[in-house]
Image (cartoon, helix red, strand yellow):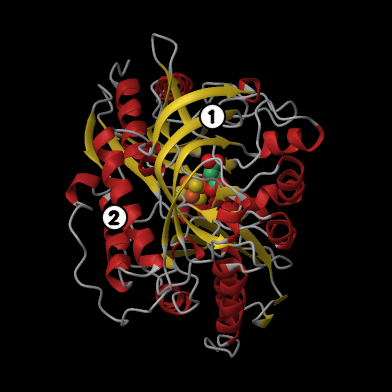
Amino acid sequence: MIEQFEESIYRLIVETSTNLPGDVRRAIKAAQEAEDRATRAGLSLSTIASNIQMAECNVSPICQDTGMPTFVLHVPVGANQIVMKEKIRSAIARATKDGKLRTNSVDSLTGANSGDNLGPGTPVIHFEQWERDEIEVRLILKGGGCENKNIQYSLPTELEGLGKAGRDLDGIRKCILHAVYQAQGQGCSAGFIGVGIGGDRTTGYELAKQQLFRRVDDVNPVPELRQLEEYIMDAANKLGIGTMGFGGNVTLLGCKIGAINRLPASFFVSVAYNCWAFRRQGVLLDGGSGEIKEWLYPRGDEVSMDEEPAAAAAQPAETEQRREVRLKTPLTEEQVRSLRVGDIVILDGEIHTGRDALHKYLVDHDSPVDLNGAVIYHCGPVMLKDEQGEWHVKAAGPTTSAREELYQGDIIKKFGVRAVIGKGGMGKKTLAALKEHGAVYLNAIGGAAQYYAECIKRVNGVHFLEFGIPEAMWHLEAEGFAAIVTMDAHGNSLHADVEHDSLAKLEQFKEPVFK
Ligand SMILES: O=C(O)C[C@H](O)C(=O)O
Ligand code: SF4
């Protein structure tokens, strides 16, 4: 039966992970045109554009977090779903072994990584029957950082900055704007949102995620929802959060809204936030052979990210103070204290990855390597071992730093760490530790996993491989690793500033719009 099915699924997985679809690319290119190229947002978008192109060229993951593989299939009546499920699982394991997916499935109780992306609940596979002979398979790879920014509202409610949100279209409007505001840059903005109105808590979120399967350039057939989508695109882009939360004209790249019935007592608005690395594709397969007949979304190679965007339209060049400073690790206190928010730091030398498991460990244990003057990189890379037993970095962008807020200040103090690289910024406790002990926070461009992998020239070693590949402490030799100082040793935080300014901007949308 359907001998080509597994191979087609494998191709779909590789395409989805490595080649951003054409409709998504167009939205990112439009964002490039709306930002001045010389601003932080403009520079970040250029990095994102090169990263997309590199991923396509290298046939490697666009972002190291290859997300939760979620398949939605439409199959002919009577098709053997058990066999299809097995073949999907086997294609997932193969794509993981080939470095197209990160080992991303972790036992929730023991923390053990299954190593092949298979395990209870991974991958997610939904089947629907239809009265056609073909098989339709859609796949979305939605990363953990943006998944953490999903939010569900229960109306009526009171929203920060927007006041009362009632059980009507205007209340829904407020929830969606609030959802974009609360994500700030942490889900690797500029992002896409899928919104589900109604249902119960489960089906509401499901509907929100389903909306992400719509094409970015489609038009909602329901007039009220079309109007709401257009309104949100306009209003959300006035919040000034910008790419990576650096401030800017483009915060939202797409908004798709659906509605289903609800219970009289419940009124949920569920929002699924997806980063710019919006990886979803689909194929139509021949029901007999399982061969790919058609791709369901425009493919990446139809829209090149190579050309320079047309001279940025709207805004005159905002003069951001920017210095470029090249530093070699380990760093000294003096070097670090001379840095200011907005400086671009180019790092050479060894850096150490560390994320959730390592931070928790270091609080009550010693470090296996000297961290005096060290740079810790919040990153869970995709790594492959060659036949000689040498490790190679296949994708290595930053992860959301906020998860380490609980530990970071203590670790800086205990080990003399001088810089932390991550994304999305950190909170007050870390900011105070940076000032007290002389350290900086460097924001790398989230999702730019190929761009940063290219800056890693060698893997010097690894500790705690037992935490799993993403959580291990990798010692990486960097060359020309660029990131922006967004929190300095003088108490300044770009993240705090953008959050504060965007809240003020959110307040302008308090008055009713849909009556
Ligand atoms: O897990 C990761 O590598 C990144 C994650 O998707 C994040 O956005 O924090
Ligand atoms: S790091 Fe950013 S781009 Fe990658 S999955 Fe997480 S949110 Fe998306």
Judging depth in this view, the residue of 130 and 385 nearest the camera is: 385
Image location (x, y in percent) of residue 225: 45, 72
Does 324 sit above or below residue 236?
above
Question: Where does the N terminus fall, quadrant-wise?
Answer: top left
The part of the image, by quadrant, that contains residue 363 is top right
10 Å crowding of disc 2: few (<14), some (14-19), many (20+): many
Question: Which residue in the protein does label 1 denote?
Answer: 475
The part of the image, by quadrant, that contains residue 314 is bottom left
Residue type for callout 2: Arg
487 on left or right of 129: right
**Residue shown at 33% from the left, 38% from the top:** 18
Judging depth in this view, the residue of 129 and 104 nearest the camera is: 104
Q: CA distance from mark 2 to mark 1?
A: 33 Å
Q: Earlier in the sequence, mark 2 or mark 1?
A: 2
The part of the image, by quadrant, that contains residue 214 is bottom left
110 on left or right of 400: right
**Residue shown at 64% from the left, 67% from the top:** 490
Judging depth in this view, the residue of 174 and 409 nearest the camera is: 409
Q: Given contact means CB atoms under 8 Å apart, are the residues at marks 2 and 1 in contact?
A: no
The residue at label 1 has a CB less than 8 Å from ligand 1: no
Does 77 sit above or below residue 223?
above
Of marks 2 and 1, the one in the foreground: 1
61 on left or right of 334: left
Question: Which residue in the protein does label 2 denote?
Answer: 25
Image location (x, y in percent) of residue 64: 46, 38
Residue type for callout 1: His
Q: Is residue 261 something that shows in the picture?
A: no
88 on left or right of 282: right
Does 251 sit above or below residue 350?
below
